[in-house]
Image (cartoon, grey):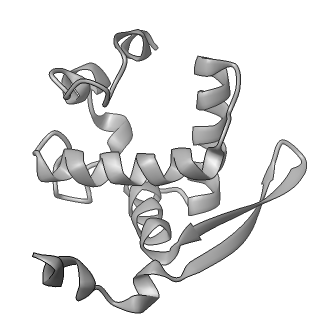
Amino acid sequence: MCEVFISADPQSYDSRTRSVRLHGVVTSIRLENLFWQVLEEIAARDDMGVVQLIEKLYDELVAARGEVGNFSSFLRVSALRYEAMVAQGRIPNDTSVAIRSLDAKAVLHGMPRGWSQPSALSS
């Protein structure tokens, strides 16, 4: 069992820090390289750079929740959710299909308990 996990390229779990400007404030975000790769894929699907995606996620999180909390953890969970939804066929594997073109309610319908909140669907 463990070989499935321990065979990962060590560079994939090395961390990298990026500085981003969120509403004029420069902040640093430290994530493992594999998470940066997934975020880059998500961003590319909607013709954005990863910093643009991070700014958009930050703004929408603040609008929905009123606060951010641990934003690096939020980004990791977002990347994990994306990969899980692609694996489940909720998001097309075809990366030319933009995320913004998808019906969020349909994508999130029937997600396992704890993976989404019904109130998040109203946005």
Closer to us: 113 or 123? 113
In the depicted structure, whether residue 78 falls above or below residue 115: below
**Left or right: 32 in relation to 27:** left
Q: Indicate the position of residue 55 as horizontal and vertical percent values.
A: 66, 46
Q: Indicate the position of residue 117 as horizontal and vertical percent values.
A: 37, 18
In the depicted structure, whether residue 59 falls above or below residue 19: above
Asked which quadrant contains residue 44, the reply is: bottom left
Total numbered circles: 0
Q: Indicate the position of residue 86 as horizontal and vertical percent values.
A: 19, 51
In the depicted structure, whether residue 23 falls above or below residue 1: above
Is any atom of residue 46 visible in this view?
no
Q: Indicate the position of residue 109 as horizontal and vertical percent values.
A: 19, 21
Closer to us: 3 or 44? 3
**Left or right: 74 in relation to 77:** right
Q: Residue furthest right?
A: 24
Tell me which residue sits at (52%, 50%) in the image.
75
Tell me which residue sits at (58%, 19%) in the image.
64
Q: Residue furthest front?
A: 2
Is any atom of residue 59 visible in this view?
yes
Asked which quadrant contains residue 19, the reply is: bottom right
**Left or right: 74 in relation to 7:** right
Tell me which residue sits at (43%, 47%) in the image.
77
The N terminus, quarter of image: bottom left
Tell me which residue sits at (27%, 19%) in the image.
105
